[in-house]
Image: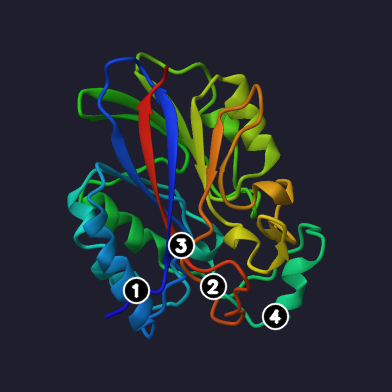
Amino acid sequence: MTMTYVLREAEMPILPAGHEDIRVLHFSDLHLTPTRAKEIADIKSFISLKPDLVISTGDFLAHKSAVPVVLDALDALLDLPGLYVFGSNDYYAPVPKNPLKYLLPNHGKRVHGPELNWQELDVGLQARGWKNVNTSRTTITIKKTVIEARGTDDAHLEFDDYSRVAGEPGKCSVAIGITHAPYLRIIDGMAKDNLDAIFAGHTHGGQVRLPWPGGSKALTTNCDLPNWRARGLTVVKGEPLLHVSAGMGTGPFSRIRVASPPEVSLVTLTAAF
């Protein structure tokens, strides 16, 4: 079966000298439903990338019956160390709306569908050893490298409270932040605490992008992150490195991606020079 996603590769030189490279599989925004056979097959193929660590930045779900579908799609990856947070679509089912509204300014108004069984998903992921950093800090050791990870709940729903995980990193080799929607208030908080890198999703890479010299240009991020940072690795002086996954899926009522194909990322953490 031919895969229909793009593999985005990036390198973060944030490890101490002498530490082995760490391959991080970063995915986001699966928006899975039981009928998305093609996307499920694509997700099952991620294991072939041979990551050392998996990071999911939320929006696993898009249907009331999607929890077992997600756990099955991720089955092989759940044998590896993993970190995750939830996004708005893990809490509430999508509802029909004009997809063009995605491109309009974000005024904070939300229309929610029925609540989804995110608790079942949380139990299923943790039962296989993945760590929920939605509102907590944890450490994980990969190849003798101690990684401290902290995360926030979804900022798009204003569920985030960075103060719950704030503070200088503890004893670790590298410190990362994980969040679904990369709102500037979270990036600023993590920057003040001198984290090395942040992983996020939510943007769908802009979902609709325009042809532009050198590639394409996002029209929106669906948050207050500048459009030029809508996907991939971006660097701003004085801030942690930011990696935004453009995600694999779309909501079931807005299945349009223009010049922003489904993607998964392989981010290699390397020793700084």
* Residue 191 % position (x, y): 61, 25
Label 3 or label 4, whichever comes before in sequence order: 4
* Residue 165 % position (x, y): 50, 29
Nearest to the eye among marks 1 and 4: give it: 1
Name the residue that disc number 4 marks: 97
Label 3 or label 2, whichever comes before in sequence order: 2
Q: Residues within 10 Å of mark 4 (few under 14, many from 20)?
A: few
Left or right of 67: which side holds 198? right
Left or right of 50: which side holds 249? right
Q: Is residue 148 visible?
A: yes
Left or right of 20: which side holds 202? right
What amino acid type should be assigned to the residue bearing mark 3?
Glu
In what element is the residue under mark 2? loop
- What whole-number distance in Å separates the C-alpha atoms at marks 2 and 4? 13 Å
In what element is the residue under mark 3? strand
What amino acid type should be assigned to the residue bearing mark 4?
Lys
Q: Quadrant of residue 6?
A: bottom left
Nearest to the eye among marks 3 and 2: give it: 3
What amino acid type should be assigned to the residue bearing mark 2?
Thr
Q: Residues within 10 Å of mark 2 (few under 14, many from 20)?
A: some
Q: Quadrant of residue 144?
A: top left
Q: Which mark is residue 263?
A: 3
Residue pictured at 41% horizontal, 20% vertical: 272
What amino acid type should be assigned to the residue bearing mark 1?
Met
